[in-house]
Image (tube, rainbow, N blue to C red):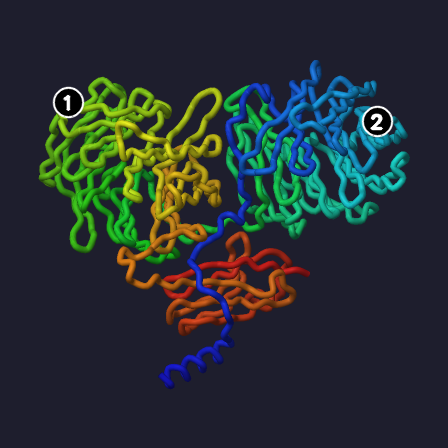
């Protein structure tokens, strides 16, 4: 014991490490620290007409939104995750453009050259109290203190006194250079204006007669403007400009991005949000870190998370309120959204591999079996940073939709020269797959289920289903036909109980008599052309059916994550119905402990669901990289160390588990829970150096490396053997060549044996 202690101390001194007090934690990522879409739900179409919202203003916990054609809506945001619509007042015969709020009055401008004053003191009953005709087209409106600034289409700025808030009084007018004030915003006491001709900075110290401090000329069709601490982003039709106006006499452009900005926002934590709209019902938000305005760093996207585009965004007390717009009436009615502001980039995948096609996967310990166009590919994922290929079965064949029960596997197979068949496989003692019997099939295969020795095969195009006996692995036999004349899109089995999707609904059948299936109950929902993925799960003495349901109708194109309690299959109860972001088609749901995972086509969404009879709490969302996002839902498997995701295009990647997720707990509860690795840093932000602290769960080889947010390695700090315990190393802010790196955000990745995790480091100058 003494010798080991001395060796340990010598090793720590040699490495320059020292003990610290850091608690152990899981190798996870806190996905809630990424921006979170708190509220996203179907908006009743009587609230917002075609086109949708044009602007939003926020005061306290109330947001005021204006629709293009209808009027002003009061939205109570006391609970950002469950906002409620309150009063509405119509503003007829106008195309509404912009709004702002002062005391309990909202000021709205429209294309009829008017300023409409709305008294919103009673949230359920807003009332129009005044309407002024300006006589010239109005572009934007801005309230600062008891003053109202209105930019006009004739390149002038009108200033109104709000001494009597319900009755603005014209106090002054100034002329500006051409096309500078399509949009107005306030930043640190200065008025910032931008239009198609350039940017202008105005000092309103004398409110009735403001002075121009400086300007910057540019070209382009300007849509929106945002400013924060001397930095401005101008969103245009096909690009976005980032400008520094800390010295109004010397305004300069720090960066020009190819991303359009139909709605833009600079946040308090140095993020730049760029909203873009595409015709038909699609929109997206791209987010950059602009801590260094000269080199914006991409953080993440929400691909088509909006039906339209966030045309106007406002930050208030850590939340972002977004007004959605679309080019015309299509898809879900556009509406109002609330986000929380995070400050971390998406984690990089720990490892990725790619195959041609990805059509299902199975898990067996730390082994993942993938159905691809290159055969059944088996990977060892015990180290999520370094996948190892274990086996490729039948590399000349395609495989789809594998299912497994107690070591028996069935899947669909095909090749360029052979028809589709049902392939039976088994596992040997080492877990390797072995091809057994097969059965030629016809028609358009769409679904497959297995329980014990019974397999069900579902067909599209009125093909019904086949019941197949696989008790003889080398010679499967057809027992009977079921549901003849129906499109059978999805099937799951649990003993004699079957969940079958056909005719637009989920049907529960008793199959104890295959010659005469007994219909027990029906649950409506889902769209005919997309599979509704089913999975039976037993939890807390209850039988659950996990349903990933796709929807396609005029109001919504996306997916729902549903969970039914079917302990009594004649009376199923819907416990959860979680609406996913637009255009995100969910794959098979995963329930691991009390974490519910929805693997979509564009993102992986996490919910915490500790009580089956209670609500599920949103716990974050992992956005897939752009080249992995597709139309069909992905699949996910949870291992002890990571989440492994398979995309329809054949890309497979591992990602950190969400923080707090219960995973890898031994079945024998008497066994101790495994220790894990945790990393932190101090100070953070830092200049010029910081301590990277880590707790090792076991004796192992340890490495500490610094990466930038593009995933490029900046420097290797440590690579040595070390004992379990608490250690730290110091980074002096230099790269591998000894040069100081630029200010910005970096990631310190620590790997100790089979464990690995990262922490964010912010270098200031």
712 is higher (above) or lower (below) than 502 = below
The N terminus lies in quadrant = bottom left
- Residue 174 in picture, x, y percent from top left: 88, 31
**Closer to us: 754 or 660:** 660
Residue located 48% across and 67% down the image: 694
Q: Which residue is mark 2?
A: 168
Q: Which residue is mark 1?
A: 516
- Secondary structure under tag 1 reads loop
In the visual, does 319 lie left or right of 596? right
Cα distance in 3D space between marks 2 and 1: 77 Å
- Residue 83 lies in quadrant: top right
* Marks 2 and 1 in Cβ contact (< 8 Å): no
Residue located 81% across and 20% down the image: 132
- Residue 313 lies in quadrant: top right
In the visual, does 166 lie left or right of 68? right
The C terminus lies in quadrant = bottom right
Q: Which mark is residue 84?
A: none
622 is higher (above) or lower (below) than 576 = below
Residue located 48% across and 59% down the image: 758
The crowding category of the residue bearing disc 1, from other C-alpha atoms within 10 Å (few below 14, some 14 to 19, many at least 20), is: few
The earlier-in-sequence mark between 2 and 1 is 2
- Secondary structure under tag 2 reads loop
Outermost top residue: 93
- Residue 204 in picture, x, y percent from top left: 85, 39
- Residue 378 in picture, x, y percent from top left: 27, 49
Total tally of numbered discs in the picture: 2
The crowding category of the residue bearing disc 2, from other C-alpha atoms within 10 Å (few below 14, some 14 to 19, many at least 20), is: many
């Amino acid at each position: 014991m003494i010798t080991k202690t001395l060796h340990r101390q010598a090793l720590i001194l040699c490495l320059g490490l020292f003990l610290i007090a850091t608690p152990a934690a899981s190798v996870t990522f806190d996905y809630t620290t990424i921006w979170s879409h708190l509220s996203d739900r179907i908006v009743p179409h009587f609230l917002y007409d075609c086109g949708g919202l044009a602007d939003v203003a926020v005061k306290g916990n109330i947001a005021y939104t204006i629709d293009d054609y209808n009027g002003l809506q009061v939205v109570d945001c006391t609970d950002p995750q469950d906002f409620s619509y309150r009063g509405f007042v119509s503003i007829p015969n106008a195309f509404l453009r912009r709004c702002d709020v002062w005391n309990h009055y909202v000021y709205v401008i429209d294309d009829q050259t008017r300023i409409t004053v709305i008294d919103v003191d009673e949230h359920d009953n807003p009332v129009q109290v005044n309407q002024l005709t300006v006589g010239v087209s109005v572009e934007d409106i801005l309230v600062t203190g008891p003053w109202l600034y209105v930019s006009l289409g004739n390149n002038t700025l009108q200033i109104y006194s709000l001494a009597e808030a319900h009755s603005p009084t014209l106090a002054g007018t100034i002329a500006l250079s051409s096309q500078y004030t399509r949009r107005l915003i306030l930043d640190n006491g200065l008025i910032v204006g931008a239009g198609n001709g350039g940017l202008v900075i105005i000092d309103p110290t004398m409110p009735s007669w403001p002075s121009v401090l400086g300007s910057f000329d540019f070209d382009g069709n300007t849509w929106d403007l945002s400013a924060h601490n001397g930095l401005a982003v101008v969103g245009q039709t096909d690009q976005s400009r980032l400008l520094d106006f800390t010295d109004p006499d010397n305004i300069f452009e720090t960066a020009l991005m190819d991303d359009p900005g139909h709605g833009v926002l600079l946040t308090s934590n140095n993020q730049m949000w760029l909203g873009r709209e595409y015709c038909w019902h699609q929109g997206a938000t791209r987010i950059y870190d602009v801590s260094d305005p000269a080199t914006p760093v991409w953080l993440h996207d929400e691909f088509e998370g909006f039906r339209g585009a966030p045309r106007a965004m406002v930050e208030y007390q850590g939340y972002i309120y977004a007004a959605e717009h679309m080019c015309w009436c299509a898809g879900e009615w556009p509406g109002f959204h609330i986000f929380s502001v995070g400050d971390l980039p998406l984690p990089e995948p720990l490892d990725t591999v790619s195959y041609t096609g990805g059509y299902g996967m199975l898990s067996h310990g730390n082994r993942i079996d993938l159905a691809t166009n290159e055969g059944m590919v088996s990977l060892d994922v015990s180290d999520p940073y370094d996948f190892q290929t274990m086996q490729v079965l039948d590399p000349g064949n395609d495989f789809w939709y594998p299912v497994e029960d107690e070591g028996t596997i069935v899947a669909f197979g095909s090749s360029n020269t052979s028809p589709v068949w049902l392939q039976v496989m088994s596992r040997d003692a080492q877990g390797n797959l072995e091809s057994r019997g097969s059965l030629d099939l016809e028609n358009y295969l769409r679904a497959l289920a297995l329980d014990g020795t019974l397999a069900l095969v579902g067909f599209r195009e009125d093909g019904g289903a086949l019941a197949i006996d696989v008790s003889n692995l080398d010679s499967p036999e057809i027992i009977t036909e079921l549901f003849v004349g129906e499109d059978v899109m999805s099937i799951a089995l649990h003993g004699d109980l079957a969940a079958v999707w056909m005719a637009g609904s989920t049907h529960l059948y008793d199959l104890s008599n295959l010659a005469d299936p007994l219909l027990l109950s029906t649950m409506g929902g889902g769209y005919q052309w997309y599979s509704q993925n089913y999975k039976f799960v037993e939890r807390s003495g209850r039988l659950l059916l996990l349903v990933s349901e796709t929807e396609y109708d005029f109001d919504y194109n996306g997916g729902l994550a549903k969970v039914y309690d079917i302990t009594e299959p004649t009376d199923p109860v819907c416990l959860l119905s979680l609406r996913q972001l637009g255009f995100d088609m969910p794959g098979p749901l995963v329930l691991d402990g009390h974490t519910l995972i929805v693997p979509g086509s564009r993102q992986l969404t996490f919910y915490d669901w500790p009580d089956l009879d209670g609500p599920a709490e949103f716990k974050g969302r992992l956005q897939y990289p752009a080249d992995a996002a597709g139309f069909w839902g992905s699949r996910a498997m949870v291992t002890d160390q990571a989440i492994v995701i398979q995309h329809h295009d054949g890309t497979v990647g591992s990602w950190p588990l969400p923080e707090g997720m219960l995973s890898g707990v031994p079945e024998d509860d008497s066994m101790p829970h495994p220790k894990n690795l945790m990393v932190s840093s101090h100070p953070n932000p830092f200049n010029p150096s910081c301590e990277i602290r880590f707790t090792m769960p076991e004796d192992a080889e340890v490495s500490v490396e610094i990466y930038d947010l593009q995933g490029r390695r900046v420097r290797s700090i440590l690579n040595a053997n070390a004992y379990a315990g608490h250690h730290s190393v110091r980074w002096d802010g230099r790269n591998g060549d000894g040069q100081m790196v630029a200010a910005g955000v970096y990631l310190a990745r620590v790997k100790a044996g089979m464990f690995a995790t990262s922490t964010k480091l912010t270098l200031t100058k």
